[in-house]
Amino acid sequence: MKGISLGIITYGSMLLSHSLCCYMAAKSLKFETLSRRRLLIQAKHFVFENNNNNNNNNNNRVLTVDEVSEIEGVWRSKEEEYLNSMQFGVTPSDFDFTDFEDDVTTTNFFIRRSDRDLIEGNDDYIIYSLLTRKAKVRDLFCCALAMTKLKALLLLNEDDDVKKKEKALQYANENVELFTNELSKNGFRVDVCQTGDMPSFEFNL
């Protein structure tokens, strides 16, 4: 019996040590390449910091590589609920293109909010975006800013949804260069963005 107990304790200790080593190794990873999730984390910080600190000289800064890694975590992101409400890259079935026809020739992405709240009784809408096959890295950055700005504007009881979308797209176009420069200064690659299995589409309207 002692031998069995000793074996269990030894195995358990080895398993615990191995798990701890794997956790520490994963925690030490730092990614300079942006993914859709990292891009949304950065866009959230950029947009909401601008909203809250309009007179602050540092209000345009983005997070560092270490700060983003800390938010991403090992098992679950600290921004998981927020990221789940930002559907970056969906299929055309999530869109009603009756009000998007004018945009097709001028943009490589589209954004819209969900028709219902993310949580019943909560004003936090799910934001969708769809990318065309012509979308470049700059379009991805611009799309992340537009989605985030739309999310921020939906918290305000002013303007209708169309106006809010227009304001979000205008904000994104006006700030994408600054956003890109801030990312670069903080150690992130701005020549590529990992999109994984994100769908993209070609439109002929």
Image (spheres, rainbow, N blue to C red):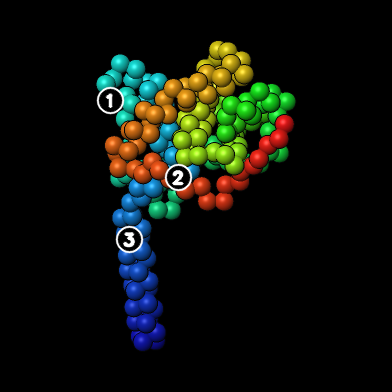
Amino acid type for the residue under numbered disc 3: Ala
Amino acid type for the residue under numbered disc 1: Asn
Q: Which of 12 and 104 is in front in this view?
A: 104
Amino acid type for the residue under numbered disc 2: Cys
The residue wearing badge 3 is 25
Density class for disc 3 (Cα within 10 Å; few <14, some 14-19, many ≥20) is: few
User: Is residue 69 in view from this perspective?
Assistant: no
User: Dividing the picture into quarters, in which one does residue 34 lie?
Assistant: top left
Density class for disc 1 (Cα within 10 Å; few <14, some 14-19, many ≥20) is: few
Mark 3 lies on a secondary structure that is helix
In the picture, which quadrant includes the C terminus?
Answer: top right
| Mark closest to the chain's N terminus, 1 or 3 | 3
Which residue is depicted at the point 32% across and 68% down?
Answer: 17
Q: Is residue 184 above or below residue 28?
A: above
Where is residue 89 drawn, in percent x and y? 58, 41
Density class for disc 2 (Cα within 10 Å; few <14, some 14-19, many ≥20) is: some
Which circle marks residue 193 in the picture? 2
The residue wearing badge 1 is 58
Mark 1 lies on a secondary structure that is loop
Which circle marks residue 48 in the picture? none
Distance between the Cα atoms at labels 3 and 2? Answer: 24 Å
Where is residue 204 drawn, in percent x and y? 71, 35
| Mark closest to the chain's N terminus, 2 or 1 | 1
Which residue is depicted at the point 40% across and 36% down?
Answer: 42
Q: Which is more foreground, mark 2 or mark 1?
A: 2
Mark 2 lies on a secondary structure that is strand
Circle 2/circle 1 CB separation < 8 Å: no
| Mark closest to the chain's N terminus, 3 or 2 | 3
Of all residues, the one furthest to the top in this rendering is 158
Where is residue 6 drawn, in percent x and y? 34, 82
